[in-house]
Amino acid sequence: MATYSLLLLRFVLLLLKYILWCGLKLLLGTPRAYIQTSLHADELPGLLVTHHLLKMLDVASANGQISQEIVIVPFANPIGLSQSLMEQHIGRFSFETVTNFNRGWFDLSVQVEKLVADKLVDDEVENVAIIRKAITACICAVLVEREEEVMKKELYKLACTADIVLDLHCDALAMMHMYTHDLLWPAMQDLCVELQSHCQLLADDSGGGAFDESYSCVWAHLKNKYPDYPIPMACQSCTVELRGQQDVSDELALQDAKALFRFLQGRGYISTPLEPSALTLIHDATPFSGVDRLSVSSQGLVVYKVQLGDMVEKGQLVAEIVNIEDVDAPRVPVIARCEGLVFTLSQNKLVRPGQAIMKIRGDIPLQWRTGNLL
């Protein structure tokens, strides 16, 4: 435990040193891209992706090809790194607070609104600087006590003035997909093309206070509150789901690292010319409220009747629940409630009533998908 406490201390000190440097960068107006991974500490594909990406960036830096600031946090959650139980790494929830590490992030919208109320002008660039200064002041004023809160505050300060914020995650069994704000589409389309994402899911606020929305929602709130002033979505943030938890391989990680490198090239962070590509957008963005999270109504073993990437119809049998207590009991069918793409599956085969086992991406909002979409 002492080793992990020392690791956290070094992590915080490094962030503090970097944040002081970022303050100067903010005043100079230097564009900045921020990429972090493994906020859910047991989601590991991003670790290997950033491993390869950092090697590429080191080469570009040595050749003088880094033209804007790029921040990589290759392991965002040293607390989750330390959490193991019975030889199993469990990094999604805090052992201390039982809080999901990617929920309950800071919502500074109202505080920032009050600080900028009488300062906004008719110049977009100046407004961005004013708002970023206010965001920085607000997060610095937040009082924190617990170890987890300290980590969140330092990460927030590190990313809150970035132009691009990418939070790399993964699902259980999944295809590549992304979550971002309604107002950031089609701005983030280039990232979806490079990563060949199968689902681009949009929401103005998906609920739960996820990391990426703690940035985008501030700008959306101010745009809505002050429509007479030029306020852009100056922080383009999104959550990238790098397929499933078991998709940790050099082949996939190198592919994704090259995609992120090309994305940064296209955005002007790397000065080397972007080679032409035949890649196109796999599927247009759809509402997050159009994603159905199918749950089961009984306990037993789940047997899937579809696979990742299958297109299903409303009313189609997608899984069956096998009763493990009675071999003669009929299987309980699980039926698709909408048509769409099966893009995630649960790894847990022993299920209980109410447990979600699959996500299906539909193209239109579903009337029962309201409130906290996460």
Image (tube, rainbow, N blue to C red):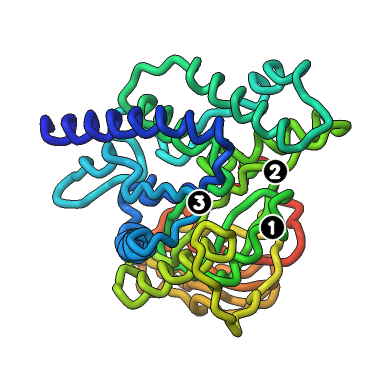
Whether the residues at callouts 1 and 2 have beta carbons within 8 Å, the answer is: yes
The kind of secondary structure element at disc 3 is loop
Is 222 left, or right, of 137 in this rendering? Answer: right
Dot 1, crowdedness within 10 Å: few (<14), some or many (≥20)? few
- What label does residue 45 carry, if any? none
**What percent of the width, then of the height, locates residue 121?**
80, 26
**Secondary structure of the residue carrying numbered label 2:** loop
Q: What amino acid is found at the position of numbered circle 1 in the picture?
A: Ala
Residue with the mark numbered 1: 187
* Amino acid at pointer 2: Met
C-alpha span from label 1 to label 3:
19 Å
Residue at the far front: name it. 64
Residue closest to the eye, 357 or 64: 64
At x 20%, y 52%, the residue is 88
Q: How many marks?
A: 3
Residue 357 appears anywhere in the view = yes
> Which element type, helix, strand or loop, lies under badge 1?
loop
- Between marks 2 and 3, how big is the CA–CA gap? 19 Å
Quadrant of the rendering where the N terminus is positioned: top left
Query: Could you say which disc has been placed on residue 68 in the image?
Result: 3
Find disc 2 in the rendering and name its residue.
233
Tell me the quarter of the picture where residue 55 sits: bottom left
Q: Residue furthest right?
A: 228
- Horizontal and vertical percent for residue 19? 41, 31
Query: In the displayed structure, does residue 8 sit left or right of residue 229?
Result: left
- Nearer-the-camera pick, 203 or 310: 203
The structure residue drawn at horizontal position 49% and vertical position 78%, both measured from the top left corner, is 307
Query: In terms of sequence position, does the residue under pointer 2 or pointer 3 come before the other?
Result: 3
The image quarter in which residue 235 lies: top right
Q: CA distance from mark 1 to mark 2?
A: 10 Å
